[in-house]
Amino acid sequence: CSIIFGCAAYDNSGISLNSNGTAAFSLRNSTSSLVSRQEIMKWNGWGYSDSRFLFNKKGQAEFTGKRYRLSGMIIPGLKDWFECTFGASLQHKTPATPLLNSSAVQPPTLNEAFVEELKSTGIPFSQDAEDRVFRAHGHCLHEIFALREGKFGRVPDMVVWPSEFRSCVICVFFFSLSLSFIGGTSVSSALECPPEETRSIVSLDTSQMNRILWVDEKNLTAHVEAGIVGQDLERLLNESGYCTGHEPDSMEFSSLGGWVATRASGMKKNIYGNIEDLVVHIKMVTPQGVIEKSCQGPRMSTGPDIHHFIMGSEGTLGVVTEVTMKIRPMPEYQKYGSVVFPNFEQGVACLREVARQRCAPASIRLMDNEQFKFGHALKPQVSSIFTSFLDGLKKFYITKFKGFDPNRLCVATLLFEGDREKVLQHEKQVYDIAAKFGGLAAGEDNGQRGYMLTFVIAYLRDLGMDYYVIGESFETSVPWDRVLDICRNVKARIVRECKERGVQFPPLSTCRVTQTYDAGACVYFYFAFNYRGLSDPVQCQNLHAAREEILANGGSLSHHHGVGKLRKEWMRETVSNVGMGMLKSVKDYVDPNNIFGNRNLL
């Protein structure tokens, strides 16, 4: 194994220097010691331990904690919506196993010589059952369902915390099998350990590699360690007046390295781009040595771009340690908005026209009618009679005066960013287009609430599982002329499959268009159902059938969730036999002993 060591250059003042010697300032995250993720996050559910939906003693829904706009609020409409939609009852509870039983976790399988070698490096590691279980899963339904029941399959035998590039090189030199763990937000079974694997499995947790090494204000780039979490990256850059603008739904917990490894997409990609548009330079440690380009130029014509071997490789080739990203000055002005359409068809037509004219705001997302009702059920209790009166007046105007059918209308949420004058001009252009398709402006509050709900919606699955309701989400990208077909057919397939598999209550089957492109869009699906009376509810979740329907309707295998183990059976069909051969050839050369990735993707 060829090991290459590298180091950053610093002058005596501590100001970081770029490779060309130009001055730049360094930003460091304030993590001075190992922080146990499980101290602040759930081990068997989504997000922070202090944040959750629940039904209180009065039967009212509320959201706990203080971290979100919805925190501490009563949500009066959620109980009725929940019971009516799923046929659920608050009398029928299925509580999760409250504590992790360490004795139920398989003991680690380790080579003592390997452990002694690792000790000699001084790199922190753990064989604790709780540390290992926490890094043995992502957030697929079947993973969380098993954890709630206290069931553990194969888990990593050890967790290792490298603190910078050189310790990653040392780790890779010693490993026999490694699984990279950063944010743990995977929804592709990428973190699952194959039960038949006999080698020791090491979870490489890069969360301590969380520094911004330098910011170059001339070139508007930042060089960042790959373990930094999205919200920390934005916070540190914001303090200096900059941002990346990359905001995936999981940005509170997902990391820069994870974004690169899965070819991530963010909610504001219309202005800032997807991760492949933001990356300037990548450093990755592999069993064959270090991969990185020789310069940080904005574009190169030097054969196939090696960055595109790395982006989307899902940890199968090595560990991403450092990334240079484009940054921008923070936007001067930000404005939310929303538009209500008579039906989903006209909403999609509007988004298509906005994309055709290339005037999409930072974020534009269209919810179907089922998701609109769902969002309405999450509206917090209003504190003012006047506010309640205004809400009623708006509803009357839309449904009675304008004649919109409450069971067909849909809503688009908007976010504009940039120079104030340009934002206002941009806003007028988008609303003028919307009006041509029957759209009515529905206010800033609805737009902001819809955008912010993105960060709490994942907590709802845990609430559902407390009352026999399970749910899952998945996504695809599709050409514009197939958007309506794929939305209709996939939702219908879910309903049909649930009925055929013995689900007693009609499922929730809903979608939204989340990102737009010149030639198509990303569509995100949600479904959930009441599983009372089913012996194996996870087997009834229909993900396989839904993905088959997506592919049959011209959709992609994934827009941004990635492949992992969950979807890799369709990879050959997706990229062709020759394409699979190319990917495997790269894997065989870079990682001939199959140390990385734990059988993801290929």
Image: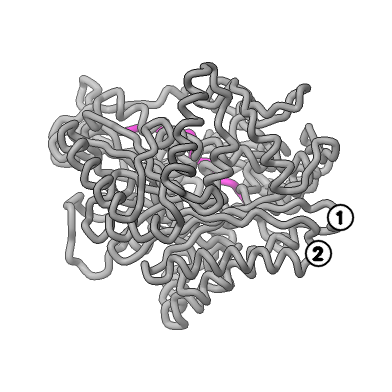
Residue at the far top: name it: 384
Residue at image position (64%, 36%) is: 126
Question: At which x and y percent is residue 92?
Answer: 85, 40
Residue 118 lies in what quarter of the image?
A: top right
**Magenta span:** 201-212
Q: Is residue 39 visible?
A: no
Element class at badge 1 = loop
> Which color scheme does this rendered protein use?
one colour
Q: Which mark is residue 581?
A: none
449, above or below 387, in the image: below
Residue at (77% x, 47% y) in the render: 87
Occupied quadrant, residue 349: bottom left
State which tag comes first along the sequence, 2 or 1: 2
Residue 341 visible at all: yes
Q: Is residue 514 left or right of residue 184?
A: left
Residue drawn 27% across and 45% down?
A: 431
Magenta-drawn stretch contains 206: yes
